Every structure is written in structure tokens, then in C-alpha cells.
Amino acid sequence: MTPELQKYYEERFSMMATEGWSDLITDIDAMIAALNSISGIENEKQLHFKRGELSILLWLKTLQEASAKTYEDLQLETRV
């Protein structure tokens, strides 16, 4: 792993260890719960928009886990 990539992940994990990140994830959970319903959708355009919103929120919600997995995989590749 390059030093730049190492720094990238260290900075990301540092950010995710903050109370602010935890608060953001709590807010995201509430937003997902509020958006994860088809009631009130009047047309296909609204459906696609809502799907996009949920997609972004789910990406943010899983970012920490995905980052940790990728970082672990990169470390294993470096050791081989």
C-alpha cells in the first residue's frame, strides 16, 4: 500500500471515530426510515428520485464497514 493510500484510510478512520460521525449515522438511519416507503409516490419520476436518495444514504451508512474491509484486503495484499 502506498503511503498516500495509507494516509487516506487513516484520515477516513479518524473521521469515522468522531461523535459527529456517529450523530450523522443516527440521522441517516432516521432519514432512511422516513424515505423507505412507497406511500406518497405519485409518479415514476418521484420513485426514481427516492431510489437515488436511498442509494446515497445506504452508501454513507455502509461506508465505514466497506472502508474497513477494503483496508484489510489492501493490507493482506501488501503482506503477500
Image (cartoon, rainbow, N blue to C red):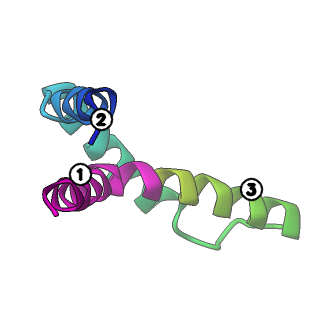
Q: Are marks 2 and 1 in contact (CB under 8 Å)?
A: no
Q: Earlier in the sequence, mark 1 or mark 3?
A: 3
The circle drawn on residue 2 is 2
3D distance between C-alphas at marks 1 and 3: 32 Å
Given residues 74 and 19, the one toward you in this image is: 74
Estimate how packed mark 1 is, as few (under 14), some (14 to 19) or many (20 or more) residues with alpha carbons within 10 Å.
some
Query: Is 27 within the magenta?
Result: no
Residue pointed to by mark 3: 49
Which residue: 16% across, 28% down? 14
**Quadrant of the rendered structure where residue 73 is?**
bottom left
* Element class at badge 1: helix
Which residue: 56% across, 59% down? 55
Magenta segment, prevailing SS (helix, strand or loop): helix
Magenta-drawn segment: 58-80
Q: Report if residue 43 is visible in the image.
A: no
What amino acid type should be assigned to the residue bearing mark 1? Tyr
Q: Earlier in the sequence, mark 2 or mark 1?
A: 2
Q: Residue 32 location in percent, x, y? A: 44, 57
Given residues 32 and 69, the one toward you in this image is: 69
Residue pointed to by mark 1: 71
Q: Are marks 1 and 3 in contact (CB under 8 Å)?
A: no
* Element class at badge 3: helix
Given residues 41 and 60, the one toward you in this image is: 60
Estimate how packed mark 3 is, as few (under 14), some (14 to 19) or many (20 or more) residues with alpha carbons within 10 Å.
few
Given residues 74 and 12, the one toward you in this image is: 74
